Amino acid sequence: MNIIHNVAQYIDELKKYLSEGFYYSYGYDLTASRQRRINFMQEKSKDMLRIIASDHRYFWNLNLYKDFRDQNVDARWYTPIIQGYVGVANGKLGNRDLTLGLISRRSHMRVGTRFHARGIDDSGNVANFVETEQLVQAENIVISYTMLRGSVPVFWEQKGVVENVNLTRGPEITKKAFNKHFEDIITTYGPIYAIDLLSDTAAREVILTKEYLRQLYDSEFKDRIKFLHLDFHAYCKGDKYDQLKILVAKVESGITDFGWFVEDVKARKVLKLQTGAFRVNCLDSLDRTNVAQSKIAISILQRQLSKLGFNIEEVFSKEVAKEGIAFIDDQK
């Protein structure tokens, strides 16, 4: 009975663990953005495992299939799982059908609870590295836009929420991992616009920004990385999140230069590529990063809807259209 009880308990715990934040699809590759997926398919790879899950950084249950792989079991028996978020909403804007999607996929390469997984590892993987993809479809046109987040890419640790930050390796030893991190994401996404939201006054955050900048200025990839430091709490003091319009104005060049991915699904034709990505961080790369990315994403969504022929001010009030669709209400 003890064995049966233990097995049942393990199953219940596994169900509870998988009940939130894990997603799978039998017909859609959740591990990769549409642009990355199409780029991979154009390579005409015969690797069935990559055909069903083209980016293994986000294939969380890959190691559970080790025996399948060793015995060459057909990849159609695999069900890739991602950790993060998937949401889809269908509706009308004006008199036209519109579908909005949001997919956040978290890398499994450096995972752990936030006080046990900080910074970077020797392979260039950072804690809480997440790719968020915003999807819009109107008629036969699909638009995809991706942004990144991740821990400050240096070696550091913090034991608890009120504890100081400690740099665990010196600048020279950090350099290789730092360069590997940016080499990987530049290869995947193109030029990077790094946005650092850490405090200018909290000593434990200042030390991270300083080391981030030291590594960046000494990096072989510095010519392909733009960097913006903005003290989130100073700008948004008193929950004045509308002040983040300053952030959008500051990163306007990145929004304009990078563009977004556009596909005509009926004609099966790629019309436009996204050519770079924002990489946002705060201390945990959670709350402050969420708000900042939301503000940028809403600004981009408005531009995308305008390109698709929607008149934002006819559908929403002029005030909402100016400040960002539903942004003010959502942040109160």
Image: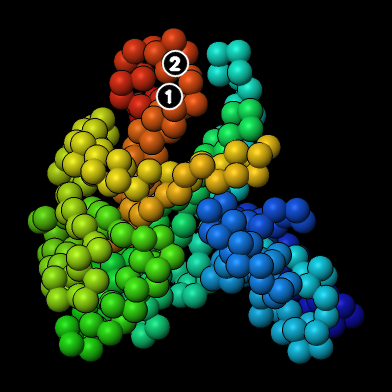
Within 10 Å of the Cα at label 2, are there few (<14), some (14-19), or many (20+) other Cα atoms?
A: some
Q: Compared with residue 84, is residue 296 higher up or lower down, i.e. above or below?
A: above
Name which quarter of the figure residue 259 lies in: top left
Q: Nearer the viewer, residue 41 or 66?
A: 41
On the question of residue 13 being in view, the answer is no
Residue 311 — which label? 2
Residue 100 — which label? none
Residue ID at (23%, 89%): 173
Q: Compared with residue 73, is residue 13 higher up or lower down, i.e. above or below?
A: above
SS at mark 2 in the image: loop
Residue 306 — which label? 1
Drawn side of residue 116 relative to residue 154, left or right: right
Residue type pointed to by label 1: Ser
Q: Nearer the viewer, residue 162 or 241?
A: 241
Within 10 Å of the Cα at label 1, are there few (<14), some (14-19), or many (20+) other Cα atoms?
A: few
Q: At which x and y percent is residue 171? A: 17, 83
Q: At which x and y percent is residue 119? A: 32, 73
